[in-house]
Amino acid sequence: MGRSRTIRLKIIGLLLVPLASMVVLWGVITAVTAGESLELRQYQTLWTNLRHPAYKLGNELQRERLASVQLLGAGVSADRSALIEQRSRSDRAKEEFKKSSGRSRDTSEAIRKQVDAVYTQLDRLDAVRGEIDTGLSDRLRTVEGYNTILDALFDLHRRVGYIDDLPIYEQSRIVIDLGYAKELLTREQALGLGTTTVAERRLFTRLVGNRRFLIDHSLGQLDPSLRETQVSIITSPVYQRMRLMEDQIVAGGSPRGWLDTTESLAKSFQEAQMRASMILQERSEPVADAGLTRALLLAGTCFALILVSIAFSLRMGNRLSKELANLRGAALEVAQERLPEVVAKLRKGETVDVPELSVASTTVEIDDVGQAFSTVQQTAVEAAVGQAQLRDGVGHVFRNLARRSQALLHRQRIQLEGMQHRATDPDDLDDLFRLDHLATRMRRHAEGLIILSGATPGRGWSKPVPMLDVARGAAAEVEDYQRVIVDPMPAQRLTGPVVGDVIHLVAELIENATVYSPPHTSVIVRGEVAARGFAFHVEDRGLGMSDEQLAEYNERLASPPEFDLADSERLGLFVVSRLAARHDIRVMLRDSPYGGTTAIVLIPAEHVTDPPDEPEEPTAAPARPIRVVQGE
């Protein structure tokens, strides 16, 4: 029976191979044929939702550019009402474009990216206007500011104009080029008003050459039905008069009637362009209908044949699918429920039983797969047990070594303190202070090992300590303490049980700031009262970090990961995240205004106490500050 089932499965597999090939072939043919038709219909939708609103927005921005240049040429006493009214029309066109383009979010990725690029340039419009209103922009800068926005709109036209029908695409591309030639004409119109500077004439000359080349190159490729209107414009007396005016401006002159002439031509070019675009849109409709009809006939014929094959194959493979579903369900139960429970118990040090995967199946191959899954999870559990034991052993080693180091360091600091009291020579006293500072740093590293092992350091205070003393104590535990500037702080205090951990946490951040910043720069430590507690700011002036690094480090600080023995270069990060999680302290990294990195430590209000009503004698710093420079 088992052998016959195996043979039957192989026969079903042989039947499914040609069936799958037939389905794929049918899908490809149908998708290609229908896709061409749908893309042609999408061309009409994109015209309505993107290109037409983009043309309207471009026209309003062209008029605003001209009004802005006229205002700049008239001086401070000019009437601004015309410009204000035009800006309102531009804003309405911008909102209409955003609303229409928002309905086309289901288009291709390339079109969505181009729409986003237009949004980005439109966001710069207020900045361009602000420079005009404050007198910070001249005519050339103003024209170039609007040019950048309009270039993004025409890039959108070119992207949307792409269609998988070569004749329609070629004509659409040419019409878009002629529309850009009209845009170049409006740029000439703005630059040619009044007397031009050398830089303006240089840009004007380049615009004239580009526009003439674009028109001459495009007209020869247009269909006769689309070319007639364009030819009538460039052969008109108005166009010829405009060309003579262009030559005069290039030569340094200021011809009369320039604005009226160019305005008339710009309007004519715009009407011709819109008429050509509507003609191309109408051409795509019958082509799309014919392609869709072919796709439906072909799909229907192939679909009827496939239905017969599918019915036979489904009946033969029904039992196999049920058994595979049972196997999948059992595997998911083990992977998502039972195995995570085993790993969680291992992390807590509890004993576990290995879950077994059992599936009732009449197929030998599925039984073999189930046994393979059981073997894999058995190996995974054994590896997890070994890793948990190793992690626990390493924690014990860390804790024992650190406790021994703490005892020796405590005795050493007592001896150093006695020697400091007895020393009279300044040089000897200075050396003793250096040794004392070295012992302080060694004590912090020993506490770091205790924290990584999961235990709690023994350092603590019974009474609240002023925040300024906490910051000074943290600064005293770093190597380059001379570079640390602790600014004056409010008189709030930190409750005694958390003083030691907060000093350690802030010291790790200060140490990191001194290591990753140039040695000639300072590290600033500030403190201020926050709405929900007290905030320390540790700011360096180094090279800073990328956005990806900031996001990665902030994620680690917010969610302390398991300590990785192979990642010994980030011990300070593990220590900070463990201490922060222990007392519900939030630690965040962000860019500094000076180019470096700022670490913010937000201590909850439950650990902060207000200063006493009556002034008291200054308390000793929780860790002796060693030559820490205080801010003025």
Image (cartoon, rainbow, N blue to C red):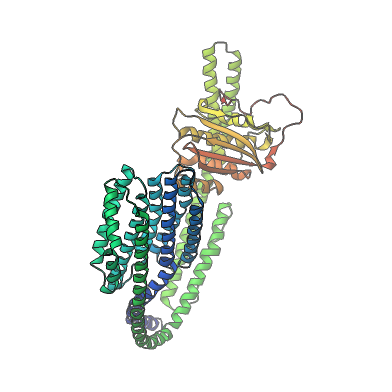
When the figure is inspected, residue 557 is found, relative to residue 624, above or below; the finding is below
Please name the residue shown 31% across and 60% down the image: 181
Residue 31 visible in image: no
Corner quadrant of residue 493: top right
Depth order, front residue of 50/526: 50
In x, y percent, where is residue 233?
30, 65
Numbered disc total: 0
Residue located 58% across and 26% down the image: 631
Say if 23 sits above or below 616 in the image.
Answer: below
Where's the C terminus, which quadrant? top right
Residue 290: image quadrant is bottom left
Nearest the camera: 58 or 80? 80
Q: Position of residue 423 (x, y in %)?
A: 57, 13
Residue drawn at 66 percent across, 32 percent down: 490
* Residue at the extreme top: 424
In the rendered structure, the answer to whether residue 50 lies left or right of residue 501 reads left
Viewer can see residue 228: yes
Q: Is residue 603 left or right of residue 395?
A: right
Across and down, in percent, residue 542 comes to 45, 35
The residue depicted at 42 percent of the width and 82 percent of the height is 317
| Residue 88 as seen in the image, left or right of residue 212 | right
Q: x and y percent of residue 326 in the render?
A: 50, 75
Outermost residue on the front side: it is: 256
Q: Nearer the viewer, residue 183 or 530?
A: 183
Q: Is residue 109 above or below residue 410?
A: below
Q: Above or below — where is 523 with respect to 50? A: above
Q: Which quarter of the figure is the N terminus placed in? A: bottom left
